[in-house]
């Protein structure tokens, strides 16, 4: 168990669990769920937010209905001889809406990207006009997703 989790009591963990399930739950319903007064729950949520346990709230949108139905993972290997290539690459991916996630990884390549686009034709265009033009890209490997088996943002709270 993480040392940070030790700073949280069971009520904090229950609050976090409820908010993970429904970020729009009213303070009154949250208070009922954890058996505290609304004032006490509000104070705890504010503390959890201030302390960085709660990063924010957002709606989860349906990519199929919004023209981004195809998910593609991309391994990116950079040309390490280019000065500042990592910083330039990181800055360039920040401004591309098609790139949902970008992770620097250990192993046989440098970054793993999660992208969302309309279809394979759109991905082909994206690869040629954006992906292969990113700073320092030497090689990419593309993995189109055939079936999304599990997709969650919920963290285990134990």
Image (cartoon, rainbow, N blue to C red):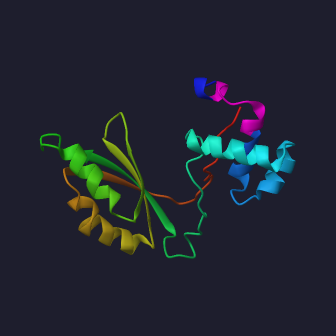
Task: Tell whether 139 sits left or right of 38.
Answer: left
SS majority, magenta: helix
Classify 145 as above or below 118.
above
Give the x, y percent position of residue 83. Answer: 12, 43
Residue 99 found in image quarter: bottom left
Picture quarter with the C terminus: top right
Count of numbered circles on the image: 0
Observer able to see residue 93: yes
Which portion, as a residue range, is magenta? 5-13
Which of the pair 106/32 is nearer the observer?
32
Classify 143 as above or below 59.
above
Give the x, y percent position of residue 125. Answer: 30, 72
Give the x, y percent position of residue 103. Answer: 39, 45
Which of the pair 92/33 is nearer the observer?
33
Task: Tell whether 30 sits left or right of 104.
Answer: right
Q: Residue at x 78, y 48 (%)?
A: 39
Which of the pair 119/36 is nearer the observer?
36
Q: Residue at x 60, y 57 (%)?
A: 57
> Is-magenta flag for residue 82?
no
Q: Residue at x 32, y 68 (%)?
A: 126
Observer able to see residue 78: no
Task: Tell whether 10 sits left or right of 151.
Answer: right
Q: Residue at x 32, y 36 (%)?
A: 108
Which of the pair 125/37 is nearer the observer?
37
Residue 116 found in image quarter: bottom left
Give the x, y percent position of residue 114. Answer: 43, 55
**Which residue appears farthest toward the front when viewing the image?**
39
> Is-magenta flag for residue 10?
yes
Picture quarter with the N terminus: top right
């Amino acid at each position: 168990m993480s040392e940070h989790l030790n700073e949280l009591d069971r009520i904090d963990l229950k609050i976090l669990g409820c908010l993970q399930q429904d970020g729009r739950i009213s303070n009154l319903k949250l208070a009922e769920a954890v058996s505290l007064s609304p004032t006490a729950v509000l104070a705890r949520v504010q503390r959890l937010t201030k302390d960085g346990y709660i990063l924010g709230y957002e709606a989860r949108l349906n990519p199929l209905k919004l023209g981004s139905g195809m998910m593609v993972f991309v391994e990116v290997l950079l040309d390490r001889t280019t000065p500042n290539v990592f910083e330039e690459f990181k800055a360039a991916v920040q401004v591309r809406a098609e790139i949902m996630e970008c992770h620097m990884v250990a192993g046989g390549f440098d970054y793993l990207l999660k992208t969302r686009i309309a279809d394979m034709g759109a991905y082909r265009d994206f690869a040629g006009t954006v992906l292969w033009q990113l700073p320092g890209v030497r090689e990419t490997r593309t993995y189109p997703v055939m079936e999304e088996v599990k997709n969650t943002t919920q963290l285990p709270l134990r």
